[in-house]
Amino acid sequence: MDQERQSFYCSCGHLEHQFHIWYDGETNGVYVEPLLSTGGFWYRVIQGIKYILGYKSKYGLFSEIWLSQTDCKRFINELKKVKRRKE
């Protein structure tokens, strides 16, 4: 995965449910880049103020990603690459 991004998409087909990973050979680390909720500047400011004031939605500000069996295997294989390089 050296500098090649792998994309993972939720099985539900929703485009906001995705993340990308890539391996950095210099640090032997995997970068995980989730797609964050989109929203304009003021939306993010309001969410930040709510967070600072301790507001907690029962749903949170997180989403989920349901990986297919094929994507699960791809994800595990990428993590195994890192483990092998650390040994």
Image (cartoon, rainbow, N blue to C red):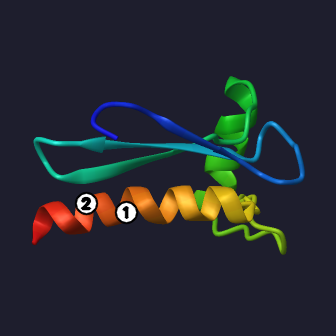
CA neighbours of label 2 inside 10 A, class few (<14), some (14 to 19), many (20+): some
Task: Kindly identify the residue that appears in the image at 51 percent across and 59 percent down.
Answer: 75
Q: Compare residues 19 and 46 and report the one nearer the observer.
A: 19
Image spot of residue 65 (x, y percent): 73, 59
Q: Quadrant of the image for the C terminus?
A: bottom left
* Mark pair 1, 2: CA separation: 5 Å
The amino acid on which the numbered mark 1 sits, given as a three-letter code, is Leu
Q: Is residue 66 above or below residue 45?
A: below
Q: Is residue 8 above or below residue 40?
A: below
Image spot of residue 72 (x, y percent): 61, 64
Q: Is residue 63 above or below residue 43?
A: below
Task: Kindly identify the residue that appears in the image at 45 percent across and 34 percent down.
Answer: 5
Secondary structure at numbered mark 2: helix
Q: Quadrant of the image for the N terminus?
A: top left
13 relative position to 10: left or right: right
Q: Which residue is mark 1?
A: 79
Answer with the quarter of the image where residue 53 lies: bottom right
Task: Kindly identify the residue that appears in the image at 16 percent across and 42 percent down.
Answer: 25
Answer with the quarter of the image where residue 82 lies: bottom left
42 relative position to 23: left or right: right
- Tell me if label 1 and label 2 are in contact, CB under 8 Å: yes
Image spot of residue 41 (x, y percent): 67, 25
17 relative position to 78: left or right: right
Q: Which residue is mark 2?
A: 82
Q: Compare residues 10 and 35 and report the one nearer the observer.
A: 10
The amino acid on which the numbered mark 2 sits, given as a three-letter code, is Val
Q: Compare residues 33 and 77 and report the one nearer the observer.
A: 77
CA neighbours of label 1 inside 10 A, class few (<14), some (14 to 19), many (20+): some
Task: Kindly identify the residue that appears in the image at 47 percent across and 66 percent down.
Answer: 76
Q: Compare residues 29 and 35 and report the one nearer the observer.
A: 29
Secondary structure at numbered mark 1: helix
